[in-house]
Image (cartoon, rainbow, N blue to C red):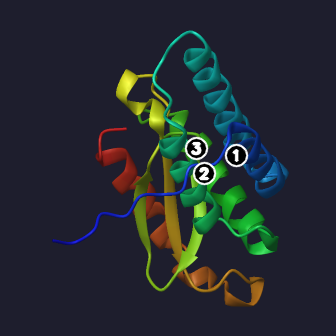
Amino acid sequence: MARQYEAPIASPEIIRRRIEQHFNDPLVNFLKAGLLTLLEQHETAVAAGGTPAHRAIESLVSHYETILQPNLGERFALDAWLIQDLSENWSRGPITLPCTILPLCGPEWMWQRLPWIEEANNSGQRVYAITLKGRNQLSSVRLLQYPWLCHELARIFHSGV
């Protein structure tokens, strides 16, 4: 029988410190604020007699630490600006795109919906990512490939945002 992986359990203080240290770039302030709020709400619920779920919160923080490098860099800033600008302009028309779309770099263009604990309570909080082809360096930017960004944004819209 295969053993199921269980993430280690960190204290709320350690989780808070990890969030504050790793997500200190202004471009991901929304993520830092969301994770800290989630942790505070959880601690309030536990103090009121709720079941602790530190493992789930730590797993979520670990996931975002893995996909977002500590030094986001100029490519992240450029891609985030392009995504935000296109999303805001498209959302002025007949379609609405989420405001939480993170740019990632990888071998192929793709979009994904990232995990967020509050989804179960229909809070409306959704976090998406678009993986742009290339490395996380400005020298890796190929502007002739950026029409794929519009394609991936349209796929997010058609996914039922």
Disc 2 crowd rating (10 Å Cα; few below 14, some 14-19, many 20+) is many
Q: Are marks 1 and 2 in contact (CB under 8 Å)?
A: yes
Closest to the camera, between mark 3 and mark 2, is 2
Q: Amino acid at mark 3?
A: Thr
Query: Which label number is shown at residue 61?
Result: 2
Pointer 3 local density, CA inside 10 Å: few below 14, some 14–19, many at least 20: some
Q: Earlier in the sequence, mark 1 or mark 2?
A: 1
The structure residue drawn at horizontal position 77% and vertical position 57%, both measured from the top left corner, is 22
Work out whether residue 56 or residue 138 is closer to the camera in this orientation and state it. 56
Residue 40 falls in image quadrant: top right
Q: Which residue is mark 1?
A: 15
Pointer 1: residues within 10 angstroms few (<14), some, or many (20+)?
many
Where residue 10 appears, x then y in whole percent?
63, 48
Residue at image mark 3:
100
Q: Camera-side residue: 127 or 130?
A: 127
Task: Name the residue located 76 percent from the left edge and 83 percent from the top edge.
Answer: 138
Q: Gap between marks 3 and 1, in whole Å?
A: 22 Å
- SS for dot 2: helix
- Side of 87 relative to 158 (left or right): right
Q: Residue at x 15, y 71 (%)?
A: 1
When asked about the image quadrant of residue 161, the answer is top left
* Quarter assignment of residue 119: top left
As helix, strand or loop, the secondary structure at mark 3 comes to loop
Type of amino acid under label 2: Val
- Depth check, mark 3 against mark 1: the one in front is 1
Q: Earlier in the sequence, mark 3 or mark 1?
A: 1
Can you name the residue that lies furthest to the bottom here?
Answer: 139
63 in relation to 31, above or below: below
Q: Is residue 96 left or right of residue 160?
A: right
Using the numbered discs, state the Cα–Cα distance from disc 3 to disc 2 in whole angstroms: 16 Å
Position in image of residue 97 (x %, y %): 48, 40
Q: Where in the figure is residue 112, as x and y percent of width and height?
A: 40, 59
